[in-house]
Amino acid sequence: MISLANAPLLLNGRDHHLPTKRRTPFTVRSSSSLQEIDKSPTTAEDSKLRSELCALVPFPPIKAAKRVVLVRHGQSTWNEEGRIQGSSNFSVLTKKGEAQAETSRQMLIDDSFDICFSSPLIRSKRTAEIIWGTREDEIITDSDLREIDLYSFQGLLKHEGKAKFGPAFRQWQVDAANFNIDGHYPVRELWGRARNCWTKILAHESKSVLVVAHNAVNQALVATAIGLGTEYFRILLQSNCGVSVLDFIPHPDGGSPLICLNRLNQTPGSPVATGSSAGRRTSRRIILVCQGSTQDSEATVSKLGDQQMNMLGVIQAQKTAELLLDLKVSTIISSPNNASAQTASIISQVQEAADCLGADCVPRYVEMKNIPDLDVAEIFQPSTKDTIDISYLLPGWLNGLDDTVTSALRERSGQAWHSLLTKLSDESEEEKIVVAVAHPVAHIALIGHCLNLTEEWLGSFHLDAGSISVVDFPDGPTGRGIIRCINYTAHLGRWSIPITRSTVDDDSF
């Protein structure tokens, strides 16, 4: 296989360069990104202008494609105690944290990383040492990868912080981007550090990079890579030993590289297990399930039509159904195309047979519904003459589509997203889980709506067949969605997509 780290890419036996359409100028969806440049008070007009300037600051050009794998450290003693860590260096990994790091090591054991960057803090460096294993190259520590600086908050239990700091602690909880303590804006400072980290990582002559750091700094690394401001703090979840993957592809014109979030927060444990999102319990959740693989082996846009699943697709659907078995899914909403409908049917059958499978003793009724707005194939048909050789398996391929196509995709998916939120708002059930099944392209667009992004961002995300992405709504369907994971595939077992691809001896992408 030709690695992502080698360009040009081969498709159907021919050289293929990724699309080069540049993003048009846009505004970062953040009310506070101005202070990433200047911490002084400003007007709303100045804030909008400086947000645009911040978003347009380019990354340094790269000569070869680079894949960066981010890992958060395993559970620490202060995680276990509920103590605010920040950039303090007093906590160590618990036994559970060591086990999580070992699971991540097994997950990444066959990956040929060129270099490992780590935070110098004990909990992160120990996680890096476990994952790095017997590799001979030295781990590079960088103080810019340390956790967010929280100054006087550090070392306090959460109830102590609330009692001692009152309104300031409340602002940290509900408006972290504008949170000020000891004369500092911690989240804004963190975003600046993350930009500095990317400059150093991209300047290193390596193609496959492992970065082991912390919750907040990994959030900032993901957000700054794809151009999101500080308002997205706590929106892109990073669990203990969760793995996130970013692809950086050289721009043919030599400018800032094309950047695609290939995976977010692939965790050692199940992504659908009960728990909190950004520290808050949730009773409302949308699970985006990508349909199983189809008989279109080339996976090109010109064949993005109504096709049956192949045998691999059936296995992927069955594995997804098994993953969701312990959840009581209320509704399955599907695209009407064959592969999506087949995937939805398999999930429904397993859900309704849960009593026979030992999950519980009460037969379940699952509402099934098809909505045309999740079927996006016809949107691409007028553009196939220009994009016939674009494979939707390539990261960032949506960047190459005509603006009229991406606008139509966003409009249709917006209607689908509204339908999902409407279904989620049904208060007749204490807990509501809605599963949406569609082509990966449709779900990329839905993620854009969840994050309130315009079509310029569509190429910033990638999804694989059979993957799931999870969005929690701790404040209900009218509140902001918390992205629990994107493109999770570990449940597929031997049929999963590797987290990274080998950079040597590959003969196809």
Image (cartoon, rainbow, N blue to C red):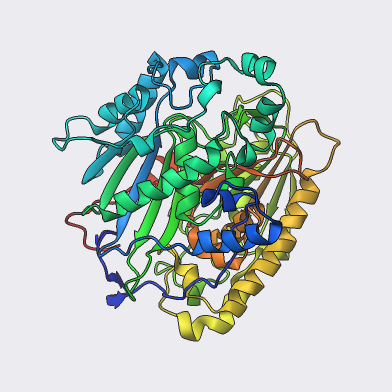
**Residue drawn at (26%, 37%), measured in percent from left and top?**
109
Q: Residue furthest bottom?
A: 385
As drawn, is 261 to the left or to the right of 126? right
**Residue drawn at (81%, 43%), measured in percent from left and top?**
425
Q: Nearer the viewer, residue 160 or 239?
A: 160
Where does the image place residue 447, in percent across and percent down from the top left? 60, 54
Where does the image place residue 295, in percent across and percent down from the top left? 46, 65
* Residue 159 seen by the camera: yes
As drawn, is 352 to the left or to the right of 103? right
The image quadrant that residue 101 belongs to is top left
Where does the image place residue 17, in percent across and percent down from the top left? 34, 74
As drawn, is 85 to the left or to the right of 67? right
- Using the image, determine if residue 239 lies above or below residue 403: above
Q: Name the quarter where the N terminus is drawn.
A: bottom left
Question: Disc count in the image?
Answer: 0
* Residue 497 seen by the camera: no
Q: Residue furthest right?
A: 428
Where does the image place residue 287, in percent across and percent down from the top left? 62, 44
